[in-house]
Amino acid sequence: MTLLHRPGLLSKLVILVICQTLSIQAVVITLPTIGKDLSIPDSRQQWIVSAYSLTFGCFLLLWGRVADLYGKRTIFVLGSAWVALTTVINPFIPNEIGFDVFRGLQGLGAAANVPTAIGILGTTFPPGKAKNYAFSTYAAGAPMGSIFGNLLGGLIASYAHWTWVFWALAILAVVVTVAGYLVIPPPIVVQGNQEGKVKATVDWIGALLITAGLMVLLFALTEGNVVGWSTPWVPVLIVVSLILIAAFVLWQRRLEHQAVRTPLMKVSIFHNRRFSAAMVIMGLFFACFNGYLIFVTYYFQDFQGHSPIQTTLRFIPTGVVGLLTAAITGKLIAIVPTRPSNGWSPR
């Protein structure tokens, strides 16, 4: 890809991450309204957001490997098109279970976009300031999506019907799909197996283990908040999920050492302490932040009696600070050197 086309590609990927944050933040603002319209009790309205996050998080590894085999551009476009289709249908679902299922299907498509977008950025921009700028700009899409998501959700909830939130998101998803098809270059065809003697296949056993493990864990954590943590099956599901995740780690380690098939995840990467620390920090952050969004929304609207547009105004500073932080971080990465700690260095 030429230097002339790189800004266009980056802008399309930024729009993608904006849409992903929009799909959560705009829906969070309208949760109380959607709940009333569909007669969903307050205790279960969180599933409207959790269903999306559940499938999104569970299928990231699988989609990343599928994109490696069948092309990042193809999976990116198909994922975006799937998001557009399911988002259009979602408002027409009149019951709670069906509505949550289609929210989960949206997350399934969005999960195909993240690893492909990051992979496209990594292969398009050379190491150095250009790549630092590209990734910091991509990261800025999340707080931008938070700002626009709040505005979109608040304005629609105040002056239109909540279904327009989904139709607006569907229109954006169509734009991303078309732009991805036109702007993202097709993959370069390379003759021969680039993985040597390792079979270029999807590790379906690993995919089943990690997907089932994460889905059971997230279901138990989400539903435990509804039915109560003393309900017997909740801790049982948590234990089962941890066993499945442990089995996945052992299976990936075996594949990595045997070097016969490519694992979904090289567990040896966690020997890097800086990488492991970063993953723990990000996991804790999103675990807290996503819950914060839901509970603060109810606090503003149900307990303080604010309208959706007033709730929107109270969320905007979060997005603005996030946008400024992403911009500053992009500058700092190019200035502050990274050093290996405790004798460990990236491989």
Image (spheres, rainbow, N blue to C red):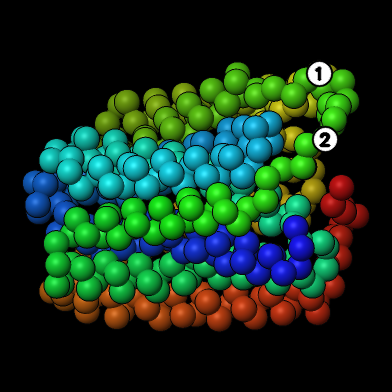
Position in image of residue 208 (x %, y %): 54, 23
Give the amino acid at mark 2.
Val
Position of the N terminus by quadrant:
bottom right
Give the amino acid at mark 1.
Val
Q: Secondary structure at mark 1?
A: loop
| Residue nearer the viewer, 56 or 225 | 56
Question: How many numbered dots are placed on residues in this image?
Answer: 2
Position in image of residue 287 (x %, y %): 46, 54
Q: Residue at x 34, y 75 (%)?
A: 315
**3D distance between C-alphas at marks 1 and 2:** 21 Å
Asked if residue 193 lies left or right of residue 60, the reply is right
| Residue nearer the viewer, 255 or 10 | 10
| Residue nearer the viewer, 345 or 143 | 143
Q: Is residue 123 visible?
A: yes
Quarter location, residue 200: top right
Asked if residue 311 lies left or right of residue 65, the reply is left
Q: Residues within 10 Å of mark 2 (few under 14, many from 20)?
A: few
Q: Is residue 134 visible?
A: no
Asked if residue 194 lies left or right of residue 243, the reply is right
Relative to 333, is 43 above or below?
above
Q: Secondary structure at mark 2?
A: loop
Position in image of residue 326 (x %, y %): 60, 74
Q: Label 1 belongs to which residue?
A: 260
Earlier-in-chain disc, 1 versus 2: 2
Residue 300, numbered circle: none
Q: Nearer the viewer, mark 1 or mark 2?
A: 2
Q: Label 2 belongs to which residue?
A: 190
Q: Residue at x 81, y 79 (%)?
A: 335
